[in-house]
């Protein structure tokens, strides 16, 4: 009878060791699979980075072009306004300059 109990205990221990070994093998397989999936996801992301970067660069270039166009528009508007003001004051400036040049104080 003690031999039967001992045999059953040894058999239970063997089954337990087999279960533990099977669990270790499954764990290693799952870890390897997770690593492969992580590498694949990382490679997929790295493959998309140039496209993402290109979109951001394109967007930044478009914003810069709009800003430049707005600055040029303002510059031309201001240039027209200054030209208009200069033309409006031209007669006064010529008259004042002639007055200064022909004033009796200048001749002294």
Image (cartoon, rainbow, N blue to C red):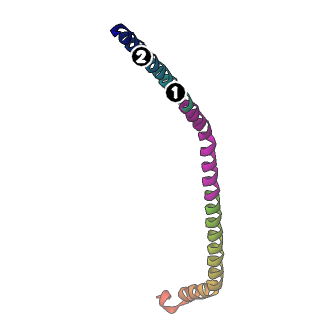
Q: Residue at x 63, y 66 (%)?
A: 70
State the image quarter where residue 40 is shown.
top right
Mark toward the start of the polypeptide (2 vs 1): 2
Which residue appears farthest toward the bottom when viewing the image? 104
Q: x, y percentage for residue 35?
A: 52, 28
Residue 10 sits above or below residue 88 on the image:
above
Q: Nearer the viewer, residue 16 or 79?
A: 16
Q: Secondary structure at mark 1?
A: helix
Q: x, y percentage for residue 55?
A: 63, 48
Residue 61 sits above or below residue 84 on the image:
above
Q: Residues within 10 Å of mark 2 (few under 14, many from 20)?
A: few
What is the chief secondary structure element of the magenta stretch? Answer: helix
State the image quarter where residue 36 is shown.
top right
Q: x, y percentage for residue 49?
A: 59, 40
Q: Nearer the viewer, residue 29 or 37?
A: 29
Please report contact status of discs 2 and 1: CB closer than 8 Å, yes or no.
no
Q: Nearer the viewer, residue 50 or 46?
A: 46
Q: Report how far apart the C-alphas of labels 2 and 1 lie in the structure.
A: 26 Å
Foreground mark, 2 or 1, reads 2
Report which residue position mark 2 lands on: 12
Residue 6 covered by magenta stretch: no
Which residue appears farthest toward the top when viewing the image? 3
Total numbered badges shown on the rendered structure: 2
Q: Residue at x 63, y 53 (%)?
A: 59
Q: Which residues are magenta?
A: 38-63
Q: Residue at x 33, y 10 (%)?
A: 2
Residue 49 covered by magenta stretch: yes
Q: Residues within 10 Å of mark 1 (few under 14, many from 20)?
A: few
Report which residue position mark 1 lands on: 30
Q: Secondary structure at mark 2?
A: helix
Residue 76 sits above or below residue 92 on the image:
above
């Amino acid at each position: 009878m003690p031999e039967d109990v001992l045999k059953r205990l040894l058999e239970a221990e063997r089954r337990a060791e087999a279960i533990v070994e099977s669990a270790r093998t499954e764990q290693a397989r799952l870890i390897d699979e997770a690593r492969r999936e992580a590498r694949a996801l990382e490679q997929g992301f790295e493959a998309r980075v140039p496209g993402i970067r290109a979109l951001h660069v394109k967007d930044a270039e478009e914003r810069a072009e709009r800003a430049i166009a707005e600055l040029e528009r303002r510059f031309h508007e201001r240039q027209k306004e200054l030209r208009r003001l200069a033309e409006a004051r031209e007669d006064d400036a010529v008259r004042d300059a002639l007055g200064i040049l022909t004033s009796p104080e200048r001749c002294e």
